[in-house]
Image: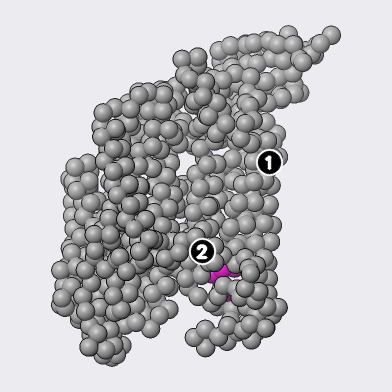
Amino acid sequence: MKNKIIHAIFDDEQDILSVVKDLRDKKIVINEVYSPFPIHGLDPVLGLKETRMAITAFIYGCIGLTFGALLIYYTIISGVGKSWPMNIGGKPNFTFYHNLPSFVPIMFECTVLFAAHLMSITYLFRNKLYPGATTTSPDPRTTDDKFLVEVICDDNKKEVISLLKKSNVSEINEKDEV
Amino acid sequence: MHKESKIRDPLILGNKTYHDITRDIARPVEGKANKYWWILLSLSAVLMLWGFACIAYTIGTGIGAWGLNTTVNWAWDITNFVWWIGIGHAGTLISAVLLLFRQKWRMAINRSAEAMTIFGVLQAGLFPLIHMGRPWLAYFVFPIPNQFGSLWVNFNSPLMWDVFAISTYLTVSVVFWYIGLIPDFAMIRDRMDKTISPMRKKLYTLMAFGWSGRAKHWQRFEEVSLVLAGLATPLVFSVHSIVSMDFATSVIPGWHTTIFPPYFVLGALFSGFAMVETLLIIMRKVVNMEAYITIKHIEYMNVIILFTGSLVGVAYITELFMAWYSGVEFEQYAFLNRATGPYWWAYASMMTCNVVIPQLYWIYKIRTSFVATFILSIFVNIGMWFERFVIIVTSLHRDFLPSSWTMFSPTFIDIGIFLGTIGFFFVLFLLYSRAFPVVAQAELKSVLKLSGSEYKK
């Protein structure tokens, strides 16, 4: 027997929270929830793990800071800086730490540049968002005002539907799994 | 679910549903432009083309086409640059700092404020580029391995910091803006039916990046927005601090002051909010956003203008005090000359527009009037332009050698380029207001049931 996909459509985000809780209490697996805006309090109810986007930003920021420092060190202090020392306003340029105050702005900007851009690229990559990608939402109204819960069920279809009907559901659509 | 106090004023007026918000935000994109839009666009485009012609003339003949002389060797170019950069600051303040402070009123205006930031920074970037004289060599300012072997950019120079600060600020603002735009483009894409031309549908499909609103995506979206806000907040303060160091690290009396970074940042926020008001008061009428950009939003911004304007006033007085207190006669003369010298009228305009006039916002009736706010915001825009003019030109025109004292008068090229950037800015903003969702509708929907007037009864 083929699995069925059930799309339950709701008009209010509060109904989503309660129905997701009820379904999960009955150990029914929820495949996905589509919504037009972030629903606060959905993540714990749906059992989503915390995202690690902020951690990636921290790592990228560290990379940016290191890059900025190495770039300055190579161009001003050692490497080419040694063979072509630039004496500007008598600012000491023999060691990195003597000159550190005037390197802070560039190192800071590199940190932010790397953290912001690489995190955003990671975000697009993880969400599979790119120019030309097509939407995977089963119903175009989910970017407007409808909230959709997608449940894949095998032999417990009746149970799922009866549970959904008890809630404030506005539509229930069935589809065969492809 | 969070609850909001009943005594807080609603941020969304009228009996709106989620679908109403969708329809209202999508209407300017889907509908046809009205007559006023076309008139404004034509006027701005004429100004823009005139500006481009002046830029072409400058590049063809050289910087001598401007009113600069050996004494006043930096004038309208850097004034306009700092003015535009300052205007660009409100967008990030609204979208980043107010996000960190969880100010919900930001949601109706952040999209347009960020657009203004990006377009403002673009105008600002034009000035150093033209001032190079040979803009095709602009890549020299970037630290790239080059044909000169060991010659690299000077990382000790504030002008070099500026390059990094402004390019980081521009690109991070664009990314922040676009991350927020993706779900809204998806909303427009999903509304398009067969009556819309397939080209437009394709364009919005392309720009929506395949957004589908999954729970995990929203979770990441919120985290990314928060982290970007956290990164953009110190960034926005660093940008104008660095712009101020272009002056503060020099040895010119009137520039060489440690108060410059905070003073410039406050001035930037002050002028940025004024420009946001100028634009939004027009835009809410033109694209029918009266229900979302309300008098409450304007009042909140007026309070910020009052606060930053007062602080800018304190900074002006502190500068005068420090000049006297320093005991350095050159410093003292620079400030005396600003206030009472041949440029007294510029100083007086600055003081009137930036310090005196915003104090009118203490009056509730003025603070909550669209007309009064619009007029006052224009004053602030003018006043902040004069502030930069005063700092730059009056500090230079009477230099260390009295025999070379002189005045600055702009040529028609100077004026043309400045007007051209205003035209260019408005062309971009008008195109934006017709092609982009001008309000962050996804965020707005998430607070409808907290702050909508219908739900607050």
Question: Can see residue B253?
Answer: yes
Q: Amino acid at mark 2?
A: Leu
Q: Are marks 1 and 2 in contact (CB under 8 Å)?
A: no
The residue under the point 54% across, 69% down is A105
Chain under disc 2: B
Residue B440 percent coordinates (x, y): 45, 36
Classified by dominant secondary structure, the portion drawn in magenta counts as helix
Q: Residue furthest front?
A: B61
User: Quadrant of residue B153 in the image?
Assistant: bottom right
Question: Can see residue B103?
Answer: no
Name above or below for residue B286 compared with residue B255.
above
Decide whether residue A105 is among the magenta residues. Answer: yes
Determine the CA span between mark 1 and mark 2. Answer: 35 Å
Name above or below for residue B415 compared with residue A48.
below
User: Quadrant of residue B380 in the image?
Assistant: bottom left
Left or right of B434? Residue A15 is right
Q: Which residue is mark 1?
A: A125
Q: Which residue is mark 2?
A: B137
Q: How many numbered circles are shown?
A: 2
Residue B231 percent coordinates (x, y): 55, 56
Decide whether residue A13 is among the magenta residues. Answer: no
Q: Pointer 2: residues within 10 angstroms few (<14), some, or many (20+)?
A: few
Q: Are marks 1 and 2 on the same chain?
A: no
User: Quadrant of residue B254 in the image?
Assistant: bottom left
Q: Which residues are magenta?
A: A103-108
Q: Amino acid at mark 1?
A: Phe
State the quadrant of the C terminus of chain B: top left
Q: Which mark is residue B272?
A: none
The residue under the point 46% across, 61% down is B135
The residue under the point 46% across, 15% down is B195
Name above or below for residue A41 compared with residue A23.
below
